[in-house]
Image: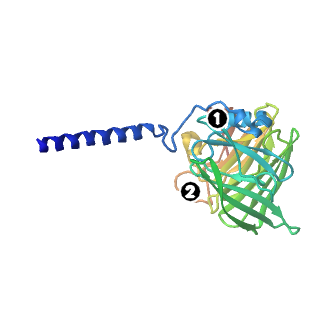
Amino acid sequence: MRRLLLITLIAISLVSCQDKTKKKEDSFSTIPLNSERTVKADINFKSNPLAERYRTVITEKYNELAVNFASYYVITTWGCGSGCVTGVMVDIRDGIVYSLPADKEWGGNGTYIDSKKESQILVTVAVTQSPSGETEENKKYWDWNEDLKKFKYIKEETVKEEQKIVFQKTLSLQNITFEIKASGEGSIQQLSIQPEGLEIDNQKITREIEGKVTNAEIEDLNSDGSPEILIYIVSAGSGSYGNVIGYSVNNKKSMSQIYFPDLSDNKEASSGYMGHDEFAIIETSLVRRFPVYNEGDTNNNPTGGFRQIGYKLKDGEASRVFEIGKIFYYD
């Protein structure tokens, strides 16, 4: 009898433990980390005083941008004076607005903000320049605590940019100006684009490029009243393979990158291609020109004449894109 009672008590205990474990698992968030969520929640403007004050700019940027921080957040920024930006981040799951880590020493959130979709580390950067032209970046690192919904200061570092400026050009059209710089030596360079005159976002764009900048041009390629800037790049080495980095202005408010397709995607256009590209804007088309190599040609002696490709700017599903139009051949 005692043995039967003991077995019964053990069985009841196991069932109870299993039930508690199940309830604990069921109460956990059903949204896994780094999940792809395509539908954004409406912004909760009452959740943050800045949201009420800057309702228009936050709404426009939130609708335009994809998630760019810590898996679920869209960071939006706007200018707060010369060399200064401020902003907020919006949780796409519930629309709650959170302030970015402000800095009393700098004012606002710095000169620009660096964030990544897959990282919970935010970097605020204040850029200064010495009389000699040397650029210094003061970077502060912040860790976002998802449970507490707060930023924690980690560290600060100063980076001096002593690299030589190898390309610099200022372009203006339709009351919008872009200062384009490339610095560094060798096959890897730093490209920076500083817009001025955009109604919402004049944040500086910085990126690493392979190769060197040969030229930059500006034109309203789709005749919508806002300009596009194109930056031409050739790779290091004897091939000088070309590439185009382009940005299109959205209704004079902000700018987005233009997708430039790989030449190998088009069999006719890429046949006999071995680099040595030249680029130029002709009216409202981007034109690419390069020598054609026949089988057996050496790199310095192409015998197939020249090919010229015309690209037109089109509206794609996610961004504006360049599409190949007419292809010409000549000796």
From the viewer's perspective, is 285 left or right of 318?
right
Front label number (1 vs 2): 1
| Residue nearer the viewer, 161 or 142 | 142
* x and y, in percent, of residue 227 in the image: 80, 38
- Residue under the point 78% across and 40% down: 282
Q: Which mark is residue 95?
A: 1
* x and y, in percent, of residue 260 in the image: 64, 43
Picture quadrant of residue 164: bottom right
Q: Is residue 209 visible?
A: no
The type of residue carrying mark 1 is Gly
Image position of 301 with respect to 15: above or below: below
The type of residue carrying mark 2 is Asp
| Residue nearer the viewer, 65 or 267 | 65
Image position of 331 with respect to 301: above or below: above
Most extreme residue toward the front, as rendered? Answer: 2
Mark 1 and mark 2: span between their CA atoms?
A: 60 Å
Question: Which residue is the site of mark 2?
Answer: 297
From the viewer's perspective, is 50 left or right of 22?
right
| Residue nearer the viewer, 42 or 288 | 42
- Dot 2: what SS? loop
Looking at the image, is mark 1 or mark 2 earlier in the sequence? 1
